[in-house]
């Protein structure tokens, strides 16, 4: 007995002991069963209650886009001078949301943040669906969307090549690369879990489909070894993308000379904002889901707490950027620059600016307090407000900068139309439809990885597998 | 080219007439319908307004008319010749436009024109610069008139009692009318005409008077300029009309005379005025004689007031007192009675006496080089005073020329109404006009007109008046007509057709000749006959050909009359004038004014003019009640922040003498308090698809005794919700930004480079633009691609000459196929004008200064739009143009976002394909659900993608108005000013052809210009090759006043502006040391540190100078 005690690692003192990542001493089998229950169990009523409206909203998106394509951009509220309105706001907003997934899966993976395992699968799925929603906008906001292929470097008889000086061109590459790598990363992570569900499948159909996508996974050492290498490489590839995508999206603005857009602070500030909103969305999704799917022991309060802290950190960076923008506008001495920022603060859209400031800067400061981080209701509401705030950030940048620029004769006012609103609601429909289908048919939790972080899987842990003796 | 189908032979039948049956002989309706059944297609042509086939017929007929060499092959020989202006017929190249001299008739004159014809259809008009009184400039109405030709709502049939009839039947009716009149000597026959300066019409009138001595003649113009002639005739006791020479005037005083905007011949006034404002000689002494000085006394903020150096705002009814006060100072004791009258009348409450006395002194210091003008809205007394003042200042024969002008003695519409009410009118002949819509309200014209037994009307539209007629005949457009007219300088100009009448209409001359029952009814012969009375018989043919070729005849002119004042004519009129009581907010003064866009309502169905922003208010598609800010506030109205294209304003009711109309109330800075400006010409019910329902009808308030200025009106609130008014520019102030730069003459003398001193300091890094031009990168031989071309196109706009008249905007719209978008879309800030006129108010809202600035693509050498386009749709060419490749554009709109001047326009919807009646309504109609002419739109589109959803009649006509050299853009595409690249390329090709084997391919300066520059009567816009140091544009750009808007962005535009210089009188009480925009900019503290001291010193120096006076 004593010999056994000696070979175990010394335990930290009780006050420094970390809360386990899976609580209530759940064992590995419980993890599998609990996640599988969502897929294999009867469809819960709340799922239908969420899915039907989402699906209808997705149909609305189709109708709105068909309408826009058949009539013209004029069905939206965009005007002269506000040539970009809700189309680009929503693009940037959705792209920003899509940042949390890859950050969690790639950067936290490289940083050996093992708590990521509980949330990474859902976050990655969220990323992919958010990027899909985002991608609709640049593709369909153009005046002649049937000619969008002009943006791709395809050799044609016209001998015309896209213009690589344009940030919109960079966007095409950044977003499409990001989407591709995110999909790959997500899928690779899914393979061992798909094998679990193949093995548990009770119908032929399920067995066939899960089997097909599990790529013959057997869980052998060689599989695991290759898998880990592949995953590490993908994490390495994804990490710069997390930073590059939103940097490049920010260059859509920073490359111009419009006061309010022409700012060198944009790339880091956009990335911070993206992570901020991404974590906001992860919280919005997971807080109700862990309750609905009884996953409180996997997505624990500690996870919530950690995500709140990330939100607090990135929110503070964003707040710093806002204040620095104001300072630089004043410091630049350019009256045009100064006016653009004064106009944000007390122009006709001041309500938008102050919504942004309160949601993005003031609200996250609540997360300094542990009591608040532990209050799920407050965290849930705050996470929604974070995303509202981030929507307004893009509104402030795009609409408020455009609507009053250099020559006062150009000044105008932007208001969305019902088609703008319908399209935006429609993207929510698409997002939630996809997400609900995902959680119903694919493991929402990375089962094999979560198992890896349970105390039971640690052979040196008192509850570890070495003691279980099931070799 | 496919074979041109010869037109059908319409010779009268000669010889024996064979008939197919008794039915035919009897021409019974049964037989007619049998013919129609037998030849359904052909017979339906008779009633079908425009079909393709008909169009081809018209086209080929116009070829014939144009004398293009098809004459020999067609059976209808060209009875009339038009000689092309610059090319011979044998040089005709299919697809190359030809130009013919013609003229745009106005009420008292004409604008001489060169009309462009593309394969037989007129597409654009330009001023005829060869005419002795023209510089090639035109006005907005002439530019827009081309669209009226292709108006799908114009009268397109001969109608009897509102039903379709035939031309033959109409002609028979006219013959009967004439025969009947012959027997009665014209008793009971009344003519109601519009004003015209056509000698042929005057001659026909004289001939008819001889034949039908008892016929009566009446003239009605809702906006009439005859007062100038009338007053000059009374003042001199001879039949004369004044002809003003503003270019000779150093001091101009306008008494409610909007000669830049609403007076007749404003294009000529603008030219002469602008000539006196130009600063082209750097050697000229920079004192207050450098440019002319304009004093304006007026109530509404007019374009003339916007260009004033000193502006006195008082109610229009009190202008007579200011005129009397000026006369008292200047004329003094012209005659004892006159002196007493003016000193009594010339006491104006609320006006600084110094203003008038200093103004008078300034005038007296410029005897023979000054002029005082009175507006057509002002009563006769003001005009008589003005004649007396000009006489005393020695201006007669200098700045005012009296020309012989006979009085044709027609009656007024009130007299016609009396005759109608007395039952004296058997047959009423109405030519043009629209009295049912615009006659004085008390005449109740629709009912009164009906009291005539038969009414025949020749009209361009089947409008309100057409509904109260027995016969309605379609009038031709001037581009379909033969005619002649005298321009205001008295030169005879020709009106020649460019196209056969599209709907087989009749000219006024032919109509009158037929009513008169004359042998010659062909308008060509009528004009020629009249010409033969003017030109000497010797060499008549040559003179006639020359007349048609040049478009004018200088061999004969009205006499210039020099005479003394006729005091017995003047004094009795003055003795009757009672000083008006000042209006209050409960007894407002209403001023009915000619609209800048639709005139008196005649252009109401013209989309270009409806969408042209009013030069002052920038409102489109309607009229409003114009109020001063103080009156607006005193009446308790509020306006929602109008930052959007839509401003939400109160909907109020204006009551005048028991009659009332409702409309939106609008603030105009600088308007006299307690006055209401009401534009005429809106609220039409039968204008057509464009005009119906735009604005409210002010004629409902207007009575014959108070036709322009009416006292005692009240405005009352209604329960209606705030009403959206669409404007193209809602922000009034320049926010202290040096966008339009201006200085007083005194400042200009001290700091000739003031425009450059107002620039922002350049950012560190020197001349490094954010968006370097790839054409500046030398190739491997060390040559920059940009240097390879002999041309570098550039433009200079002189803000000192630009008066904001907006002719350039319409010219650009016509030249470049710019679509109209409708009120609703303008409200969403989606208007498509490539060229806009920015208007800023500076100073106080009570007495603002106004500046205007044409804003169009600046053709930046380092263009911010180019590098952000992901598909290379907007690129630079080697001649410095920033060009758009429409085919390549996918519509990301980033170029517009990065354009600091925001001069790019995006086709948010398929504006070129939307039906005219959809312009006002909901703009959402998807082809997936819509049907047009009973056909599913998508199927229709599949069958013919180009026609759009327009109904056939619109489509067939409006496509003819397009310039074939310019692409018609579809939805989803960005467009902008191209510096009229089609004209540049045309000129280059012409030069290359001319150069032949030589290398002389450089286009010579002045051989062509852009549409805006060509239309500009002020010659404020100059376009040319900046690589040529001797070109006019290079010389202008070398001036010290030359500056770049937003120069600190280092976009290096090819379009630069010449700063404005004002010439206020330092002795005047309202003298401002600096123009308000300069002052505002200075307050903002944007000026260069180095310039700071100098500016302040200058300001203080002026203050000291002011104190000393």
Image (cartoon, coloured by chain):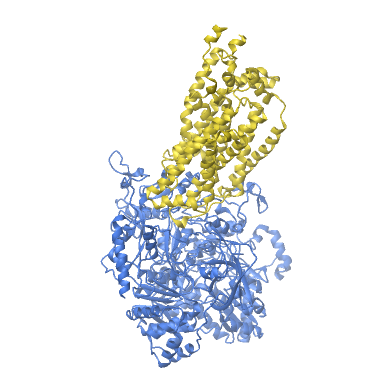
Chain colours: A yellow, B blue
Q: Residue furthest left?
A: B283
Q: Quadrant of the N terminus of chain A?
A: top right
Q: Quadrant of the C terminus of chain A?
A: top right
Q: Count of labels shown?
A: 0
Q: Is residue A138 visible?
A: no
Left or right of residue B986: residue A112: right
Q: Position of residue A193 (x, y in %)?
A: 61, 21
Left or right of residue A127: residue A269: left
Q: Position of residue B210 (x, y in %)?
A: 54, 86
Closer to us: B633 or B309 = B633
- In the picture shown, does residue A77 fall above or below B237? above
Q: Position of residue A93 (x, y in %)?
A: 54, 40
Closer to us: A230 or B954 = A230
Q: Position of residue B296 (x, y in %)?
A: 42, 74
Q: Is residue A418 visible?
A: yes
- In the picture shown, does residue B788 fall above or below B851? above
């Amino acid at each position: 007995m004593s010999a056994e005690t000696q070979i175990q690692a010394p335990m930290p003192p009780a006050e420094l002991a970390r809360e386990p990542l899976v609580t209530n001493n759940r064992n590995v089998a419980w993890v599998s069963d609990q996640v599988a229950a969502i897929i294999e169990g009867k469809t819960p009523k709340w799922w239908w209650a969420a899915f039907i409206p989402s699906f209808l909203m997705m149909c609305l998106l189709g109708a709105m886009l068909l309408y826009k394509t058949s009539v013209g951009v004029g069905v939206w509220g965009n005007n002269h001078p506000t040539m970009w309105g809700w189309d680009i706001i929503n693009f940037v907003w959705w792209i920003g949301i899509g940042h949390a997934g890859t950050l969690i899966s790639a950067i936290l993976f490289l940083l050996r943040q093992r708590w990521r395992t509980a949330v990474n699968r859902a976050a990655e799925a969220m990323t992919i669906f958010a990027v899909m929603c985002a991608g609709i906008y640049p593709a369909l906001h153009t005046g002649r969307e049937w000619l969008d292929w002009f943006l791709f470097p395809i050799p044609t008889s016209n001998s015309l090549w896209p213009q690589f000086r344009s940030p919109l061109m960079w966007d095409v590459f950044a977003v499409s690369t990001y989407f591709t790598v995110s999909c790959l990363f997500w899928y690779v992570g899914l393979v061992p879990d798909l094998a679990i569900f193949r093995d548990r499948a009770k119908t032929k159909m399920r067995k066939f489909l899960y089997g097909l996508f599990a790529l013959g996974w057997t869980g052998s050492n060689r599989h695991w070894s290759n898998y880990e290498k592949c995953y590490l490489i993908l994490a390495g590839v994804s990490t710069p993308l997390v930073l590059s995508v939103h940097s490049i999206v920010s260059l859509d603005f920073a490359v111009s000379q419009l006061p309010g857009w022409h700012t060198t602070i944009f790339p880091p500030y956009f990335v911070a904002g993206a992570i901020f909103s991404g974590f906001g969305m992860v919280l919005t999704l997971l807080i109700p889901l862990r309750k609905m799917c009884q996953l409180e022991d996997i997505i624990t309060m500690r996870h919530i707490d950690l995500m709140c802290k990330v939100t607090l950190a990135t929110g503070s960076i964003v707040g710093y950027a806002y204040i620095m923008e104001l300072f630089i506008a004043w410091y630049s001495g350019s009256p045009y620059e100064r006016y653009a920022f004064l106009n944000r603060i007390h122009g006709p859209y001041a309500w938008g600016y102050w919504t942004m400031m309160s949601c993005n800067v003031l609200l996250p400061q609540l997360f300094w307090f542990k009591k608040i981080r532990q209050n799920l209701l407050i965290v849930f509401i705050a996470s929604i407000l974070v995303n509202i705030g981030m929507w307004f950030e893009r509104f402030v940048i795009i609409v408020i900068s455009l609507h009053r620029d250099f020559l006062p004769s150009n000044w105008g006012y932007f208001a969305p139309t019902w088609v703008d609103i319908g399209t935006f609601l429609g993207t929510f429909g698409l997002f939630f439809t996809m997400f609900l289908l995902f959680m119903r048919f694919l493991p929402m939790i990375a089962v094999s990885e979560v198992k890896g972080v349970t105390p039971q899987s640690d052979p040196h842990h008192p509850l570890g597998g070495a003691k279980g003796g099931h070799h | 080219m496919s074979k041109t189908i010869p037109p059908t032979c319409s010779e009268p039948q000669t010889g024996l007439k064979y008939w197919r049956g008794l039915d035919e002989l009897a021409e019974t309706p049964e037989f007619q319908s049998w013919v129609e059944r037998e030849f359904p297609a052909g017979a339906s042509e008779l009633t079908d307004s425009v079909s393709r086939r008909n169009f081809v017929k018209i086209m080929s007929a116009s070829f014939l008319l144009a004398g293009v060499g098809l004459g020999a092959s067609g059976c209808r020989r060209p009875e009339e010749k038009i000689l092309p202006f610059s090319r011979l017929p044998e040089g005709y190249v299919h697809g190359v436009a030809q130009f013919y001299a013609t003229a745009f008739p106005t009420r008292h004159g004409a604008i001489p024109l060169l009309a462009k014809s593309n394969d037989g259809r007129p597409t654009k008009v330009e001023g005829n610069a060869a005419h002795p009184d023209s510089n090639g400039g035109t006005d907005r109405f002439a530019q827009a008139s081309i669209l009226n030709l292709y108006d799908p709502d114009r009268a397109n049939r001969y109608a009897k009692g509102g039903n379709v009839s035939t031309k033959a039947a109409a002609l028979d009716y006219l013959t009967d009318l004439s025969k009947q009149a012959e027997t009665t000597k014209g008793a009971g026959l009344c003519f109601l005409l519009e004003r015209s300066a056509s000698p042929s019409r005057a001659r026909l009138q004289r001939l008819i008077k001889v034949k039908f001595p008892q016929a009566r003649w009446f003239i009605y113009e809702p906006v009439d300029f005859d007062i100038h002639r009338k007053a000059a005739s009374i003042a001199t006791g001879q039949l004369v009309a004044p002809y003003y020479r503003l270019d000779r005037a150093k001091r101009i005083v306008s008494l409610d005379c909007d000669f830049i905007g609403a007076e007749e011949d404003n294009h000529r006034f603008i030219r002469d005025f602008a000539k006196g404002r130009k600063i082209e000689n750097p050697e000229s002494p920079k004192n207050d004689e450098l440019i002319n000085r304009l004093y304006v006394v007026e109530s509404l903020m007019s374009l003339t007031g916007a260009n004033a150096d000193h502006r006195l705002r008082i109610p229009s009814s009190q202008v007579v007192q200011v005129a009397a006060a000026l006369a008292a100072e200047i004329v003094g004791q012209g005659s004892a009675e006159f002196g007493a009258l003016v000193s009594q009348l010339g006491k104006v409450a609320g006006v600084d006496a110094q203003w008038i006395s200093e103004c008078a002194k300034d005038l007296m210091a410029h005897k023979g080089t000054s002029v005082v003008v009175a507006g057509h809205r002002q009563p006769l007394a003001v005009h008589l005073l003005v004649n007396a003042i000009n006489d005393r200042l020695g201006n007669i024969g200098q700045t005012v020329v009296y020309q012989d002008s006979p009085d044709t003695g027609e009656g007024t519409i009130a007299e016609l109404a009396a005759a109608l009410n007395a039952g004296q009118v058997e047959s009423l002949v109405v030519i043009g006009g629209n009295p049912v819509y615009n006659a004085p309200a008390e005449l109740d014209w629709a009912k009164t007109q009906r009291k005539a037994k038969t009414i025949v009307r020749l009209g361009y539209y089947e409008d309100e008046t057409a509904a109260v007629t027995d016969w309605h005949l379609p009038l031709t457009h001037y581009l379909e007509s033969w005619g002649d007219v005298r321009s205001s300088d008295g030169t005879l100009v020709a009106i020649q057709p460019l196209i056969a009448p599209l709907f087989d209409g009749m000219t006024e001359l032919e109509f009158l000749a037929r009513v008169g029952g004359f042998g010659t009814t062909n308008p060509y012969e009528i004009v020629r006959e009249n010409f033969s009375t003017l030109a000497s018989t010797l060499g008549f043919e040559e003179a006639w050909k020359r007349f048609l070729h040049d478009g004018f005849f200088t061999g004969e002119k009205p006499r210039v009359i020099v005479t003394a004042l006729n005091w017995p004519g003047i004094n009795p009129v003055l003795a009757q004038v009672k000083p008006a009581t000042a209006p209050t907010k409960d007894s407002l003064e209403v001023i009915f004014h000619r609209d800048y866009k639709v005139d008196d309502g005649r252009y109401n169905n013209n989309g270009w003019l409806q969408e042209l922003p009013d030069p002052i208010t920038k409102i489109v598609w309607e009229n409003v009640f114009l109020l001063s800010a103080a009156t607006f506030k005193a009446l308790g109205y509020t306006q929602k922040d109008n930052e959007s294209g839509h401003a939400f304003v109160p909907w109020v009711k204006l009551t005048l003498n028991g009659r009332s109309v409702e409309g939106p109330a609008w603030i105009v800075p600088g308007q006299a308090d307690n006055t209401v400006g009401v534009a005429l010409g809106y609220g039409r019910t039968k204008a057509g698809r464009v005009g119906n329902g735009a604005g409210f009808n002010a004629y409902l308030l207007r009575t014959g005794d108070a036709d322009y200025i009416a006292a005692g009106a009240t405005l009352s609130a209604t329960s209606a919700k705030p009403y959206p008014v669409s404007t193209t520019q809602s922000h009034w102030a320049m926010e202290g930004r040096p966008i339009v730069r201006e200085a007083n003459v005194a400042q200009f003398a001290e700091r000739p480079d003031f425009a450059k001193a107002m620039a922002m300091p350049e950012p560190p890094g020197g001349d490094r633009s954010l968006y370097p031009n790839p054409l500046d990168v030398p190739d491997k031989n060390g040559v920059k691609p940009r240097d390879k071309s002999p041309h570098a196109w550039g433009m200079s706009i002189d803000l000192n000459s630009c008066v904001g008249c907006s002719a350039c905007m319409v010219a650009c719209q016509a030249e470049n196929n710019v679509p109209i978008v409708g009120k609703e879309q303008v409200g969403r800030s989606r208007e498509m004008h490539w060229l806009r006129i920015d208007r800023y108010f500076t100073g106080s809202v009570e007495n603002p200064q106004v500046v205007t600035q044409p804003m169009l693509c600046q053709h930046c050498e380092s263009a911010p739009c180019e590098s952000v386009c992901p598909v290379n749709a907007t690129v630079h060419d080697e001649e410095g143009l920033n060009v758009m490749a429409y085919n390549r554009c996918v519509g990301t709109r980033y170029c517009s976002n990065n354009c600091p001047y925001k001069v790019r326009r995006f086709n948010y919807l398929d504006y070129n394909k939307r039906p005219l009646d959809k312009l006002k309504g909901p703009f959402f109609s998807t082809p997936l659900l819509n049907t047009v002419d009973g056909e599913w739109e998508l199927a229709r589109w599949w069958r013919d993608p180009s026609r759009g959803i327009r109904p056939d009649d619109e489509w067939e006509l409006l496509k003819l108005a397009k310039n074939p050299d310019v692409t018609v853009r579809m939805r989803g595409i960005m467009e902008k000013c191209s510096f009229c690249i089609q004209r540049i390329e045309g000129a280059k090709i012409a030069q290359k052809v001319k150069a032949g084997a030589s290398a002389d391919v450089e286009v010579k300066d002045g051989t062509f210009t852009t549409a805006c520059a060509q239309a500009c009567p002020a010659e404020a816009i100059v376009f040319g090759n900046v690589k040529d140091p001797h070109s006019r544009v290079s010389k202008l750009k070398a001036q010290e006043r030359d500056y770049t808007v937003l120069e600190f962005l280092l976009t290096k535009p090819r379009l630069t502006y010449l700063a404005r210089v004002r010439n206020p009188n330092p002795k005047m009480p309202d003298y401002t040391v600096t123009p308000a925009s300069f002052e505002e900019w200075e307050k903002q503290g944007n000026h260069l540190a180095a310039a700071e001291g100098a500016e302040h010193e200058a300001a203080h120096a002026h203050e000291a100078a002011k104190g000393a006076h």
